[in-house]
Structures are given as structure tokens and as C-alpha cells.
Amino acid sequence: MNVSTYCRTTATGGLPNISFIKRKPEPLGTEFKNIVDGLTGQMLWLEIQEGKDRMKTKEFQGRLGGTAACVMRGVKASEDLEHIPNFEENNEEPRSRLFFADSWFGSVKAVATLGLAGHHACMIIKTAHVRSPKFFLEERMKDFPGGTWITMEGKTELEGVELICIGYKYNKKKVLTFVMTRGAGSTTKGIPYEAKFPDKYGNVCMRHVARPQIISNYFRFSNQVDLHNQARQFDLALEKNG
């Protein structure tokens, strides 16, 4: 499977829409959505966010809404790139791709829509938690130790797509919620998370925290998009020289 990931960033310079996003390293700039291949690091697709009125005219927007529509535009643009390699183990579904996405894109609707299109997805769920068991998992796991997870499965009533939801706790406090298509990856134990912390003498210590294989893959490949964003923001300094 091809592994792609989404994120948002800012840059300035004579583009259709200038926005202000306070939490960004450069708050005033132009917002992008992009897809980067997780195996090769190639940028596959980039979309400039042109403001509310212009974005309403984009493909899929009326039927799916802003975030899921953006996902499908990126998928449509990158799904048939034959020069992009697939996972070697994906012999049964050679045209199927696996898409990872951060919380801006993550929703049950987006994952189910990708499933209907014949692809796989694994997305983290935060604000777009409609139809997900996010609050249930947070309450159920509040006293769980780090390195534990709960796996739930079912079929969406609207789309009829089989999905799996994982509640994962990597420390004593934080519960992460992931939604994925059935077949996106394994929920058994994978490569652990390396938690680093100082001891009382200031020495750096490390502890391995268990996590499912699909979540190991999510964090392993998702950082590819960060490399492109950092290059635009800092190496090329587009925000400073627009």
C-alpha cells in the first residue's frame, strides 16, 4: 500500500487567500493541504486554501463537506500514480492505497468515504468526533496505564463500511482515538514508542511503551509531511520572504 499523510501549514506571498492561524509558527500566511508519500518522501499533491467562498465551489464540497471533500480531492489526484510504490505485502489489493491523516482531516465520514472508494485509511480523531466512541474510550480508559489500548469494530449505518476504532493510551493521562478501515493494518502489538525522560540526576532515560502495529506505522510515516513543511517554513523561509 502507498502511505500518504495530510497536514496544514502556512506561507505568504501573493496567493488567493491570506489567513491568520494563531497556533502556527507563522500565523499570518497562506494555508496549504498536502499529501506526501510515506515510503519515498515525494510530495504528491498540494492544495491552496482559497477562502470559504472559493472553496465551496471545489469538487466533492457540497456532498461531503469541507474536510472529507479535501481528502477525496487529494486521493483522486494521487491514487493512480503508477510510479509510486506500494507495500510489498499488498498483493491482494494492488490498486488500494493506505492514507494516514491528522486530526484536521480525521473523521468517521472521511475514513468511510475512502473505504467506499476502495482504499484504506487510518486517521486520528479529535474535534470531528461525530459517530465515533471517542468520549466513551476516554472515560473507560481514564485509569488505564500507558501502553494499553481498546479495539472496537463495527459497520457504519450510512455508508455500510466496516471500521475499526482504537483507543490508545501512551501515558497515564492522554487517550488517543484512531479510526481505520478494516484491512488498513494490524491491531496486535507493533514497534513500541520510545518515551524519553530525565531521572532525578538529569540523565536521559528511555522506556518502551507498547502500541498497536497500525499506530506504529501511523507515526513512522506521518512525519514525512513534516519534513516538507519544515523546509517551506524554515529552510526556504517562504513565510519570511513572500
Image (spheres, grey):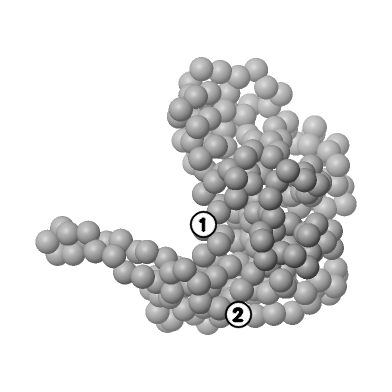
Q: Answer left or right for 117 relative to 168.
A: right
Residue 173 versus residue 236 in the image, above or below: below
**Residue beneath the point at 61% across and 74% down:** 186
Q: Earlier in the sequence, mark 1 or mark 2?
A: 2
Numbered label attached to residue 156: none
Pinpoint residue 105: horizontal percent, then vertical percent: 67, 53
Q: Which residue is mark 1?
A: 220
Q: Is residue 76 visible?
A: yes
Q: Secondary structure at mark 2?
A: strand
Tally the numbered discs. Answer: 2
Q: Is residue 2 left or right of residue 103?
A: right
- Three-letter code, disc 1: Arg
Say which residue appears at 75% left-offset and 65% top-offset.
Answer: 91
Q: Amino acid at mark 2?
A: Thr
Crowdedness of circle 2 by 10 Å Cα count: few (<14), some, many (20+)? Answer: some
In depth, the one of 191 and 165 nearer the eye is 191
Where, by quadrant of the figure, is residue 99 drawn?
A: bottom right
Q: Where residue 151 is drawn, which disc sits there?
A: 2
Q: Is residue 34 visible?
A: no
